[in-house]
Amino acid sequence: MLSSEEIKSITLSLGADKCGIASTDRFSSAPIGFRPSDIYSKCKSVVAFLKNLPPEVIMVENPVPYTHTAHMLYAALDQIGLNLCYELEKLKITSVPVPTDNPYLFWDADNKHGMAILSMRHAAFNAGLGILGRNTLLINRDYGNMVYIGALLIDAEVEPDPIVTDFACPENCRLCLDACPANALDGITVNQKRCRENSCYQHPRGWDIYTCNECRKVCPLRNGET
């Protein structure tokens, strides 16, 4: 059986910037239907991995570069997950890649509230890749909140990474909460309706354009610890 370090090494060789492993028992507080074993009954561990969002892409005045880069990262992470699935299959480990963004099943149209089949930010947190900030985003020690997340469900029990406990959002910091133009953040969760109505614009030609990332911009840990 492959070790945790060997799985992470393969994942990094496929293009991930960071990788961690979570045991399935760390997802016990997730809603029923949204736990790794609800997706894949054979799942015993979750491999989570990150790619860094180029820091300056959210600072530009035009929203198109950020939108374009985000879609490229979703595709890159999905490809890493698929390639990792093939590599592990060669080593007699079965696995299931999880969509980085969509599709997903749960959608509350009235509240514009969607739930991915697996929460990527919680998968990364459970795999020791960072903390969950007051803006609800994962914050990695090296890359800050400038990360996108992928995940793979595997049928092997491997050593999980320790959950990060030695850094946190600055005490009493409210920069992201106060900067949100839609007042969608309360420090614990996000009101998706308010957020989506302010941050996602559908172009007449059908494109979704991401028009707001203020909670990323103002975070003092945006680019990691300094």
Image: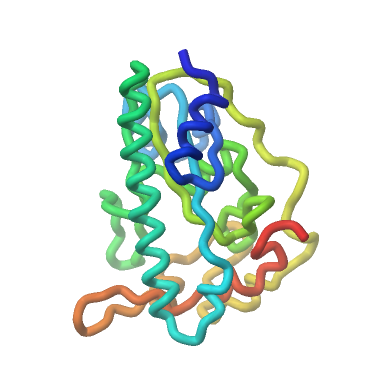
- Residue 17 x, y percent position in the rendering: 54, 47
151 and 188: which is toward the camera: 151
Instruction: Indicate how the structure is coloured in the image.
Output: rainbow
Left or right of residue 94, residue 27 in this image: right
Figure quadrant of residue 110: bottom left
Report which quarter residue 225 is drawn in. bottom right
Camera-side residue: 67 or 171?
67
- Give the residue drawn at x 38%, y 39%: 34
Q: Where does the image place residue 167, in percent across and percent down from the top left? A: 76, 49
Q: Residue furthest front?
A: 13
Residue 96 appears in the rendering: yes
Is residue 138 depicted above or below 45 in this figure? Answer: below
Looking at this view, name the residue that lies furthest to the top: 1
Is residue 28 in sight in this rendering?
Answer: no
Query: Which residue is pictured at 54% across the width and 39% down the height?
Result: 19
Q: Is residue 136 above or below residue 119?
A: below
Residue 118, image x, y percentages? 40, 43
Q: Residue at x 61, y 73 (%)?
A: 217
Coordinates of residue 88 in the picture (x, y in percent)? 37, 25
Count numbered badges in the picture. Answer: 0
Return the residue found at the far left: 205
Q: Quadrant of residue 15?
A: top left
Position of 169 with respect to 186 (left or right) is right
Residue appearing at x 62%, y 54% in the figure: 139
